[in-house]
Image (cartoon, rainbow, N blue to C red):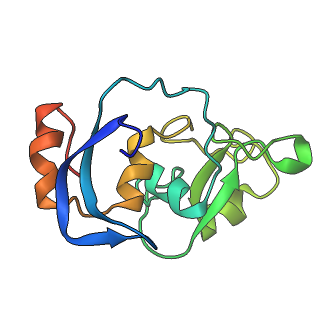
Amino acid sequence: MWKGKAEVLEKLDRPLHSATATFPWPHVIRLVAYVRVPRTVQRKISRRALFARDGWRCVYCGTTGGRMTLDHVIPRSRGGESTWENVVTSCGPCNLRKADRLPEEAEMHLSRPPRPPAPVLFIKLATPRVPVVWQQYLNAFGAAAA
């Protein structure tokens, strides 16, 4: 905003203070010019993001609640990596049953193949409740409210 690259559309009731100046506290800003966002950003895996991606349910049996764990589809001992495409949410009993085997070897099936989550998942995790003042801007662009 200071350099004129963005403008404040909505501000909070309280100001921001620096040592020598006072500014409006932005709540919604608009970029004056489009800034290209690189699409090759790889988000690190966290248990919370993984469980949210899988709907907080075991991908093998579909149960919810209880003690959820992280499971490598291709076990690390067999060269499997900790990537979004190889990690799933599993309940404790299914993780113990699968153990150090491939799902086919344990006669278990994934409800869906693992893949990287959509970027909106991280927004929903960071901001579980969307402020009311944001709604008009989200609806204008067809974005789903969290």
**Picture mark count:** 0
Is residue 54 in sight in this rendering?
no
* Residue at image point 65% right, 60% down: 70
Above or below, 145 relative to 38: below
Identity of the residue drawn at 70% across and 38% down: 104
Q: Left or right of 135: which side holds 77? A: right
Residue positioned 12% across, 56% down in the render: 133
Q: Position of residue 129 (x, y in %)?
A: 24, 64
- In this view, the residue in front, 40 or 34, is 34
Nearer-the-camera pick, 85 or 26: 26
- Residue 47 falls in image quadrant: bottom right
- In the image, taking residue 41 as reference, residue 140 lies left or right, namely left
x and y percent of residue 12 in the render?
A: 19, 66
Front residue of 101 and 27: 27
Residue at 15% in and 41% down: 137
Q: Position of residue 33 (x, y in %)?
A: 35, 24
Please name whichever residue, 65 or 39, is drawn nearer the observer in this view of the structure: 39
Residue 64 in view: yes
Q: Quadrant of the N terminus?
A: top left
